[in-house]
Amino acid sequence: MPMSTPQAQDIKDQSKNIQDILEKIGWYLTFALIPSGQPYFGLFFLLISKLASLFSRKKQELIPTSASDLPRRAGLLFIFLLVYMFLNSFFSKQPINSLLLSLALTLVFYFYFFGGQRLAFADRKFLTTCFLLFTCGGTLVSLATLIRYFVLNLSRAELFGGPNSLGTLIIMYTGVGIGFLLSRGKPYSYFVFPFLTASVCALLATQSRGAWLGFIGMLFILMVLNYKKKIALVFLIILLIAACLLVTNPKLNDRFLSIFSLEKGGNMTRIHIWQASLNMIKDKPVLGIGLGVFPAVYPDYAPPSAKKDQTFAFAHNIFLQMATELGLIGFVLFFLAFALTYFLAYKLAKSGNSFYQGIFATLVGVLIHQQVDLPIWKTNIGIGFWLLLGLSVGLYAMEANKAGNYQFQEFALHLNKGNNGKSN
């Protein structure tokens, strides 16, 4: 006997509610666990929610169109890059590995870069909860890092991964967390100083020099964007305290000074990796060696002065990584997509919105670090970074829609005249 219409509708509503609950749990877990580099629990629930939607008639939510073409162009550039990765895999020295990595990156981009764009249009209370969990997760990570460092007497602090990966995560959750706390006003803004202090101490304990430089860059951006506000003084005080610790602590001081020495801290090893990367580019300039092939071919391209028994997973520079593995075509697509996304994040930051400033400063800090390391090329670390890129594109599109059907120049003027971003 066929089911009555009211009963069928009830089942559809229940199915939709379950999917929504699973999706929310996925996002909550993602934001809470990104600071620790363990976002896979969130991805698990997002996958279940997506699979459940395949067996229902729930309408697929699309990314809303924008009054500006720039967000759409940024998304298209990344789509072109992903398509190129698949095509490039057939010319790779290890086609199966390249195809699998392309599939993994496509999955990450679908859920986080493009999912981040959809999130920008989500309910404000939901987003506020997400970033509150993100900030609280970052605080716990800083405290756990310091406790493990001192109790276990570690040479370098680490948590669920290496010190450099932790350094990138600290930059990520600190910049966004500062922006979130400031944007919420009092009493949240009172927690900026202790939150930032804990982050700085944890970062120093990692002894990740690239992360130190990225963190300095992130705070510098925040100071420049807020130079007329009292909070800029707080950032300056924190930097001075960190500088004092670097000068007075022999271990930290020696680590910092090693930045300027070719003989200390593995600097020569990085130079060898970069030389090998350039040799790969010379050999395969157009199509590259293939996605994920770098560690397999590194010994063949390493300079004579490099140790022969060593191999490395990455080029330790994000732009060299793209050029070596995907060639000139992939590099150009990647660079254009990156440049446009960062431009959108910059325009948002210029609006005066503290939350947008935090996102932009974070993206700059992480990018600085990726010039000498490449933690974001690991999926567990990269998820947070790609999510922030997607959010930047989505938030720009949202603000463009709020501004109406202006041309881009009028929209930029609208932001700069004091759209204080009350939508965070």
Image (tube, grey):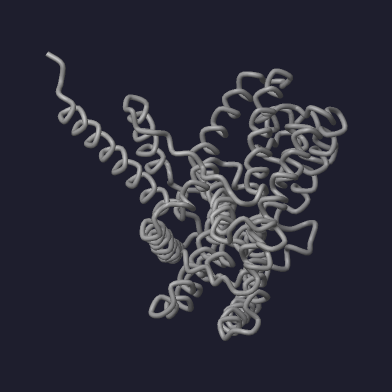
Q: Quadrant of the N terminus?
A: top left
The quadrant holding residue 349 is bottom right
Which residue occupies 39% across, 33% down?
59
* Residue reaching furthest to the top: 1
User: Relative to residue 407, is residue 357 drawn left or right?
Assistant: left
Give 390 or 247, whichever is nearer the viewer.
390
Residue placed at 35% from the left, 35% from the top? 49
Q: Residue furthest front?
A: 405
> Which sits in the foreground, 21 or 255?
21
**On screen, residue 268 above or below 61:** below
Instruction: State the image coordinates of residue 357 (x, y, percent, origin top left).
Output: 59, 67
Q: What is the quadrant of residue 211 in the picture?
A: bottom right
Q: Position of residue 323 (x, y in %)?
A: 77, 37
Q: Is residue 178 visible?
A: yes
In terms of depth relative to the viewer, which is nearer, 201 or 196?
196
Q: What residue is at 35 percent from the left and 42 percent from the top? A: 23
Please, is residue 190 above or below residue 28 in the view? below
Answer above or below: position of 283 versus 117.
above
